[in-house]
Amino acid sequence: MQKSDLIGKIANDAGISKAAANRALSSLFSNITKTLKKGDRISLVGFGTFSISKRAARIGRNPQTGAEIKIKATKVPKFSAGKSLKEAVR
């Protein structure tokens, strides 16, 4: 499913226009991004939790040359599915 498909389903289920559904979905994505950027977590009970995970600096290898490269420490977004979501997809 692509974003446009999801917007169509939201619009249909909620009885709103696709433009309104697009604004709502864009707002959701924007607010999730802003919250994670601040370092906070987002918990949607039954659905899951969005959080930030820290990845330590490490040494990697260039697959073409085999040369060692330094990979910087970074933060990455993480999603943990909630119990209800896990049970729904079984």
Image (cartoon, helix red, strand yellow):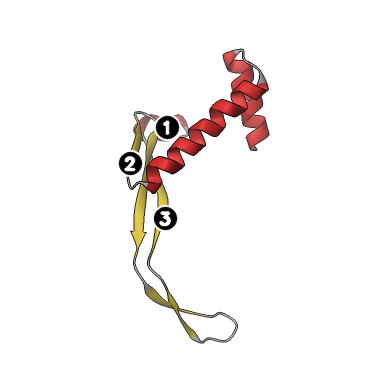
Nearest to viewer (mark 1 / mark 2): 2
Which comes before the other along the chain, label 3 or label 2? 2
Residue bearing mark 2: 41
- Residue sitting at x 61%, y 12%: 15
Dividing the picture into quadrants, the one containing residue 88 is top left
Query: Residue 8, image x and y in percent?
Result: 66, 25
Marker disc for residue 31: none
Dividing the picture into quadrants, the one containing residue 80 is top left
Are the residues flagged by discs 1 and 2 in contact, CB closer than 8 Å?
no
Secondary structure beneath dot 2 equals loop
Mark 1: which amino acid? Leu
Residue bearing mark 1: 85
Mark 3 and mark 2: Cα distance apart in space: 13 Å
Residue bearing mark 3: 76
Within 10 Å of the Cα at label 1, are there few (<14), some (14-19), or many (20+) other Cα atoms?
some
Mark 3 and mark 1: Cα distance apart in space: 22 Å
Query: Residue 5, image x and y in percent?
Result: 66, 31
Query: Residue 29, image x and y in percent?
Result: 50, 37
Closer-to-camera residue (85/34): 34
Q: Quadrant of the N terminus?
A: top right
